[in-house]
Amino acid sequence: MGRFIHGRTGIVVSVADHKDGRFTAPWRAYDGSGAVDYSSMKVAELRAEIERRNAGRDEADLLPVEGRKADLVAALEADDAAQTEQ
């Protein structure tokens, strides 16, 4: 049985037959810990997640959409940490 989380909605599903390739972006494997492994995502997926989070934010609070993959991953991880602190 595989568990997957939807990148935009956060919905988690468990499926019995997960090896046929139907669960691709924006779905990603989910281990139940709540932590997302951003380094396993493609740059386009990272940018899409950042754009989703930036919707409705003040300009001062926007996450950077440009940069290297490591920069995008760091921005998302920092944003997750900031959300957890609130």
Image (cartoon, helix red, strand yellow):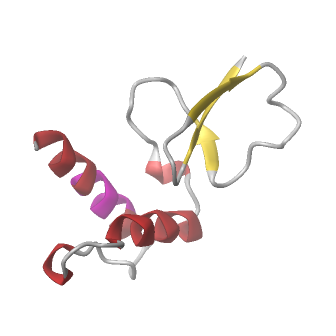
At 36% from the left and 72% from the top, the residue drawn is: 55
Marker count (numbered): 0
Q: Is residue 54 above or below residue 77?
A: below
**Residue 20 magenta-highlighted:** no
Q: Quadrant of residue 64?
A: bottom left
At 54% from the left and 31% from the top, the residue drawn is: 30
The picture places residue 34, in percent across and down from the top left corner, at: 39, 31
The N terminus sits in image quarter: top right
Q: Residue furthest left?
A: 86
At 39% from the left and 82% from the top, the residue drawn is: 66
Q: Is residue 42 above or below residue 16?
A: below
Q: Residue furthest front?
A: 56
Out of 79 and 12, give the one closest to the viewer.
12
**Residue 77 magenta-highlighted:** yes
**Going by the image, does 69 lie left or right of 21?**
left
**Going by the image, does 73 lie left or right of 86?**
right
The picture places residue 6, in percent across and down from the top left corner, at: 58, 45
**Going by the image, does 82 lie left or right of 33?**
left
The C terminus sits in image quarter: top left
**Principal secondary structure, stretch drawn in magenta:** helix
The picture places residue 81, in percent across and down from the top left corner, at: 20, 46
* Residue range corresponding to the magenta coloring: 73-78
Q: Is residue 15 above or below residue 9?
A: above
**Going by the image, does 5 lie left or right of 59?**
right
Q: Quadrant of residue 68?
A: bottom left
